[in-house]
Amino acid sequence: MKKDVAVVACGVMTAFGNLDATWSGLVENRTALTGVKIGGAKLWPLGVVPGLVDAFGSHQRLDALLERLLDDLPDIPADTALIVATTKGAVDELLHHPKKPARQQPWDIAANLAQRLDLTGQTSTVSAACASGTLALIHGAQLVISGEADQVLVVGVDLLSQFVTGGFLKLHALSPEPCRPFDKNRNGLSLGEGAGYALLTTREIAGAKGLPKLASIVDWGVACDASHITAPCKQASGLIAAIRQITEKGHVIGAINAHGTGTPYNDAMEMRAFKELWPAIPTFHSVKGAIGHCLGAAGIIEAAIAIRSLQEGFIPPTVGHVTSEPDVSGVSGSRSLELLYPSILSCNSGFGGINAAVLFSLRVNT
């Protein structure tokens, strides 16, 4: 019998602050994006985690971000498995100290964090562009189902940095104003930094230990269209394939947490996928107009927000969205929308055509 995977704890640290502060900001249709200079003369609207004083892209900043994120982490057994999702880690260490061993790079964050938390279970890293967080959650669920681990801590973290900001500038992908996901007049993304965690186990273990069962991970899908190294597939073939691995089993989708970066091509790709998959698109939203695109941490941050949506019974506004495309309905816009069923599909897409989707529900069988 397949084991049921439960999320028993989750948290985030975003440009709004912790999960409660982030949820409040979203529900109130506010943005935490502010004008910031990183390695250049121009101000860009970015999602900066408040209270972090160390340099962007530095290992000190990453350490401080993780410290704040995990401040409310419940006690966990030493044999808990750890999965870290990130795209670049403290990448500016390579710029500032090229001749010294760089700390908190993607290849050593998990080992450093396991040591810090006194964990002896297996550790692994998922670095698969902007789908990293969702793929890490899927990997964690697989470890629980297979019995390789009774409990899995999944952590996502990425920083604002000169390297990443410069890269997106070269791609002409940044918006000069806070991004506007799924808006007819959208013109680019806004970067953010942040971190999130989710603690996974089986519903049976959660019940035996008296742990809260916040939501179930019901199913998931993964696909790669390999259409282009950076641009999404215009036919949305990868995202459609990933979501169909879930919907073809008859699961009911109550709402969608979309990737929704605010770039012309990504949002068009997602809307094409939704229209092809559903005659009537489920209600959907994006959080990136409020906190920015948090890269490898996005999937885990958005999973925590999706779980809060399940508990509250609605999805929050899509901050920055003003005018929908003429043939698209269902986006939350400036108001919250009620869930029609207690399940949320959260999906992310990344460079290289990577697409991942995971279905959360308050019910085991949905």
Image (cartoon, rainbow, N blue to C red):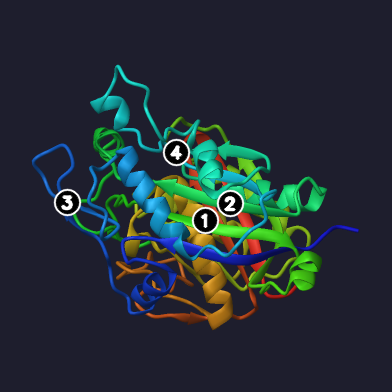
Lower sequence index among marks 2 and 4:
4
Which three-letter amino acid code belongs to the residue tagged 1? Ile
Which three-letter amino acid code belongs to the residue tagged 3? Val
Which three-letter amino acid code belongs to the residue tagged 4? Thr
Tell me how far mark 1 sits from mark 2, CA to CA. Answer: 8 Å
| Residue where numbered disc 1 is placed | 300
The residue positioned 49% from the left and 61% from the top of the image is 302
Image position of 248 (left or right of 49) = right
Image position of 34 (left or right of 104) = left
| Residue where numbered disc 3 is placed | 36
Q: Nearer the viewer, residue 264 or 17?
A: 17
| Residue where numbered disc 4 is placed | 87
Secondary structure of residue under mark 2? strand
Lower sequence index among marks 1 and 2:
2
Q: Nearer the viewer, mark 2 or mark 3?
A: 2
Lower sequence index among marks 4 and 1:
4
- Classify residue 103 by image quadrant: top left
